[in-house]
């Protein structure tokens, strides 16, 4: 049949003035009709078009279904878990329609925690999101059930890397994926992550080496020292700088010991008698007439920035103190952390080094010192906030709400936690006066942390500048909508 | 009243209404919400002092709102339905307030008046004269058109891509002058030819041959049997009076709304709803035309089932119909479809012989599965025969997500072995694809 039609198409292409269709090979019945058409008409084009019409209809009516040349898609296994409720599904659809990524994560956590899975009708949308947002992949795949897993493997464009083992991703993925995988492995198995890095080290490019080295910041320990020592002579300056920075932060490493040995010679505890010998006074004396050992240059101690109220030597000493584990001073001075800090606080010359201890506590992950430094001196070790107790976190959040409003997760790092009403009230009181910085988009990212009870308070916030009232009203409507979505979400599960 | 969000949004006249409707679905915007079996209502605070009063006729899915928007339904109507979907408990079951009752009663009165209203009987002599004049114009147009088609095939279609369809567009305008709107539409469809596709010469010849045949058929109209005659007249552009059609007895059935297609042509919006009668096992195509700024009167939603009386337009196709009476939406039941592609093929041969000019036919076929590779998507029946599926990867994965690779009942539209998937029945639920 296609031959008959193709013959006509070829004729149409070049034109009937140049070619006539060859009907000799046509089936008898068709040739009969074609001949009748020819006989009734003189006009070549008329004959051609009528004949084409004949074959056009013959072709349409004459197709037959072919045997399948593909096998049907393999059937998915049955689900073990029940589907979420239709209300939860509606809530999810609202979240997807509004593109509320943070709410989506929140919804997925609820879904997983209640051992439910997403309805099939929403799987495709979620897998599209998983493909585009690697940080959501794990959450999504946990809620997609067997059908989601099955479906994700059918579409090569959905590169759901979370399904592969992290080791496989490190070996075969793109650079961002490899870095993320290495970070992931380092969380659960620091030695394995180090071994993988060591194995691939020589094949990596300089920039990649430097990027991957960041993974060792996680669970850094003395066991990492041999590997880091072996790469201190790397060709890349960036790699060298990062290596020394890591070695500096390992308590007990050769660099740490060397730095402490030098620094303690500059910081001495002077004891003197007071009140006719009845009391002993302690104070810190600092020796600023020093020259750094040559090796300290490569450890990163020579690139000083200018700081107000610090001379060059004072700044160097500051850096040295911040590079010593704070608990080393406890043994050195035989004093408790509280006392050490009090002694440093006594004199103006030594008080300026209190924040150096905060940096040290942060670098060496010393929780005891970090808590003490904040509670007594309001010096914050930002990296250690996740380890603080909830009430301290709340205190920090309330104290620093204005400073960290734009980086809330630095002081409230738990992404799944609901914030207290008092904190949210403080936040809104501050942000209401700057609707351009703290816009609708700002609240879309964080509103899922707000308690539902904020709805009772929301009308009480007004910007001081009346010109901002219109903007604020728009933001307020958005916040109310977002909290209602949260309410719907909670009720759905 | 159990519409999905997709179904509610399908009522929106444009994307910006969908977006605004979703924004306004927030409960904080609404007060005094209520419903009963006839209507749903609420008051929505806008920028003005007085809130807007929005109401929905639940039996016929019609909307009214006191806002100044000219869109239909407006964002408030959509928002009210969406809000009900999210928070139905906030709606109190009660007697309608006066402003709702008044509207519902007026609508019922209007419906009654429509059925009672007598048609002004047209003067048969003038009608005949107008018809003769029109037929003469069409015949003149057809002569010109056939000459054009012959010139095209004489010179060969190879050079058509260079001419960018200018000849067809000119001819389309001529056909409007000849009062043959249908032929004009056929000519405009040459703009859909994709000259980068290998198959374009075959598609081009198919269109030319079909157009030529329609012209020949019109010239020999009186020799055709009645049904085919009506189909040809319809293809040329003759219309039927909807009021006259509504006088006829239609088919009362539960009609599943299989899908909706929307096309924009110049200033016109064309909606095509494909329906399937559960008991009569008949298909129907409801066509609705609206000028873009005007409200859409038709409110049937894909994926729902309506109890309605449909009257078919005359012709062999027996597809195009209009809704004479619509009662209420019902839950969708499952259906019995064809059992194999061989049966589909036999059915298609019968359809094609009754109307050779139809572009596509609808079918429902049970127990089919999907097979696909990088370039093709096929449906496989229980005899392991297959047909080509025309569609997007989005549709493919949506279907697979719903069915999990198991056999399902498919609602298809197409012909000659190539079909698009309108919807899927699986686990006693219908989903529009």
Image (cartoon, coloured by chain):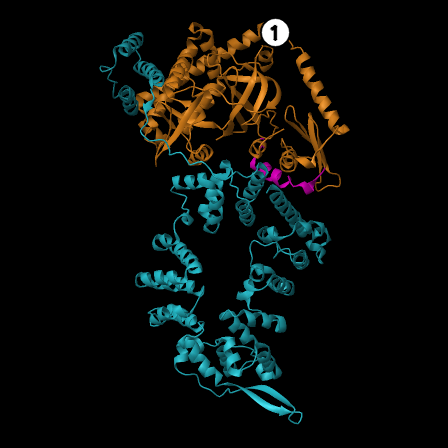
Chain colours: A cyan, B orange
Which residue lies most toward the bottom here? A276
Q: Is residue A424 above or below residue B316?
A: below
Q: Position of residue B204 (x, y in %)?
A: 36, 24
- Per the image, label 1 sits on a secondary structure element best described as loop
Residue B384, percent from left and from top: 34, 25
Label 1: few (<14), some (14–19) or many (≥20) C-alpha neighbours in 10 Å: few
Asked if residue B302 lies left or right of residue B414, the reply is: right
A61 vs A87: above or below: above
Quadrant hosting residue B332: top right
Residue at the extreme left: A24
Q: For residue A53, what is the image quadrant?
A: top left
User: What quarter of the picture does the N terminus of chain B occupy?
Assistant: top right
Residue A40 in sight from this viewpoint: yes
- Depicted A44 relative to depicted A93: above or below: above
Magenta stretch: includes residue A343: no
- Viewer-proximal residue, A464 or A341? A341
Of residues A477 and B344, the one nearer the viewer is B344
Image position of A194 with respect to A134: above or below: below
Residue B280: percent from left, percent from top: 52, 14
Q: Which residue is most to the right?
A: B98
Which of these two is toward me, A269 or B189?
Answer: A269
Task: Write down the region rendered in magenta.
Answer: B11-31
Chain for numbered disc 1: B
At which x and y percent is residue A343?
59, 82
Residue under numbered circle 1: B123
- Decide if residue A480 is on the left or right side of residue B198: right
Residue B68, image quadrant:
top right
Q: Is A218 left or right of A447, judged from the image as shown?
A: left
Q: Residue at x 64, y 49 (%)?
A: A479
């Amino acid at each position: 049949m296609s031959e008959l039609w193709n013959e006509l198409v070829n004729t149409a292409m070049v034109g009937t003035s140049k070619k006539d269709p060859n009907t000799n090979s046509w089936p008898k019945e068709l040739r009969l009709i074609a001949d009748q058409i020819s006989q009734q008409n003189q006009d070549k084009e008329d004959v051609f078009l009528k004949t084409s019409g004949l074959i056009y209809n013959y072709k349409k009516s004459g197709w037959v279904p072919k045997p399948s040349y593909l096998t049907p898609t393999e059937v998915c296994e049955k689900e073990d878990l029940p589907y979420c409720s239709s209300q939860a599904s509606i809530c999810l659809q609202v979240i997807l329609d509004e593109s509320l990524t943070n709410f989506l994560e929140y919804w997925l956590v609820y879904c997983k925690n209640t051992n439910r899975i997403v309805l099939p009708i929403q799987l495709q949308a979620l897998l599209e999101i998983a493909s585009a947002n690697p940080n959501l992949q794990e959450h999504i795949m946990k809620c997609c059930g067997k059908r989601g897993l099955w479906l994700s493997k059918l579409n090569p464009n959905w590169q759901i890397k979370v399904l592969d083992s992290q080791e496989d991703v490190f070996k075969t993925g793109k650079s961002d994926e490899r870095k993320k995988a290495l970070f992931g492995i380092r969380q659960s198995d620091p030695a394995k992550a180090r071994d993988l890095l060591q194995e691939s080290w020589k094949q990596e490019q300089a920039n990649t080496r430097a990027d991957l080295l960041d993974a060792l910041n996680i669970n850094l320990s003395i066991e990492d020292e041999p590997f880091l020592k072996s790469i201190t002579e790397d060709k890349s300056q960036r790699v060298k700088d990062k290596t020394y920075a890591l070695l500096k932060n390992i308590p007990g490493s050769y660099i740490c010991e060397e730095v402490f040995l030098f620094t303690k010679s500059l910081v001495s505890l002077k004891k003197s008698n007071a009140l006719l010998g009845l009391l002993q006074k302690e104070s810190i004396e600092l020796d600023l007439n020093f020259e750094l050992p040559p090796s300290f240059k490569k450890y990163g101690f020579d690139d000083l920035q200018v700081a107000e109220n610090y001379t060059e030597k004072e700044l160097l000493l500051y850096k040295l103190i911040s590079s010593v584990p704070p608990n080393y001073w406890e043994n050195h001075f035989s004093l408790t952390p509280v006392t050490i800090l009090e002694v440093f606080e006594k004199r103006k010359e030594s008080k300026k080094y209190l924040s150096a201890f905060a940096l040290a506590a942060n670098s060496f992950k010393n929780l005891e010192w970090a808590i003490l430094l904040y509670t007594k001196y309001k010096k914050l070790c930002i990296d250690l906030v996740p380890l603080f107790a909830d009430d301290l976190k709340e205190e920090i959040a309330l104290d620093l709400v204005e400073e960290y409003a734009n980086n809330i997760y630095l002081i409230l790092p738990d992404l799944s936690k609901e914030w207290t009403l008092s904190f949210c009230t403080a936040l809104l009181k501050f942000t209401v006066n700057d609707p351009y910085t703290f816009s609708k988009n700002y609240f879309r990212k964080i509103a899922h942390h707000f308690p539902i009870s904020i709805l009772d308070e929301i009308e009480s916030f007004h910007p001081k500048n009346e010109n901002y009232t219109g903007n604020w009203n728009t933001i307020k409507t958005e916040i109310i909508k977002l909290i209602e979505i949260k309410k719907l979400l909670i009720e759905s599960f | 009243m159990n519409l999905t969000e997709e179904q509610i949004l399908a009522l929106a006249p444009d994307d910006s209404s969908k977006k605004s409707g979703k924004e306004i679905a927030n409960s904080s915007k609404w007060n005094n919400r209520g419903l009963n079996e006839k209507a749903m209502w609420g008051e929505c605070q806008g920028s003005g002092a007085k809130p807007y009063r929005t109401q929905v006729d639940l039996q016929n899915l019609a909307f009214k709102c006191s806002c100044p928007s000219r869109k239909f339904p407006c964002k408030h109507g959509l928002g009210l339905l969406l809000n009900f979907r999210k928070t139905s408990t906030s709606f109190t079951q009660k007697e309608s307030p006066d402003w709702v009752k008044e509207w519902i009663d007026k609508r019922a009165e209007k419906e009654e008046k429509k059925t009672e209203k007598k048609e002004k009987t047209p003067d048969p002599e003038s009608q005949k004269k107008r018809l003769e004049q029109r037929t003469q114009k069409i015949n003149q147009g057809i002569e010109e058109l056939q000459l054009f088609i012959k010139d095209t095939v004489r010179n060969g279609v190879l050079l058509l891509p260079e001419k960018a369809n200018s000849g067809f567009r000119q001819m389309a305008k001529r056909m409007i002058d000849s009062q043959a709107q249908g032929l004009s539409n056929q000519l405009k469809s040459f703009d859909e030819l994709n000259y980068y596709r290998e198959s374009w010469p075959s598609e081009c010849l198919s269109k030319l041959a079909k157009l030529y045949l329609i012209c020949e058929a019109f010239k020999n109209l009186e020799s055709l049997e009645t049904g085919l005659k009506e189909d040809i007249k319809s293809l040329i552009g003759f219309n039927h009076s909807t009021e006259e059609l509504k006088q006829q007895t239609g088919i009362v059935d539960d009609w599943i709304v299989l899908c909706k297609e929307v096309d924009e042509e110049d200033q016109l919006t064309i909606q095509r709803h494909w329906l399937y009668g559960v008991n009569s096992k008949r298909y129907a195509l409801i066509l609705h035309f609206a000028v873009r700024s005007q409200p859409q009167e038709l409110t049937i939603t894909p994926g729902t089932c309506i109890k309605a009386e449909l009257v078919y337009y005359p012709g062999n196709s027996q597809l195009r119909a209009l809704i004479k009476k619509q009662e209420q939406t019902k839950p969708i039941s499952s259906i019995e479809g064809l059992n194999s592609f061989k049966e589909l093929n036999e059915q298609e041969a019968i359809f094609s012989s009754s109307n050779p000019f139809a572009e596509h036919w609808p079918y429902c076929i049970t127990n089919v599965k999907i097979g696909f590779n990088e370039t093709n998507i096929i449906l496989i029946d229980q005899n392991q025969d297959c047909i080509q599926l025309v569609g997007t990867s989005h549709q493919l994965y949506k279907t697979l997500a719903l069915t999990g690779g198991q056999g399902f009942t498919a609602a298809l539209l197409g012909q000659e072995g190539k079909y698009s998937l309108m919807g899927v029945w699986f686990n006693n639920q219908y989903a529009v694809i």
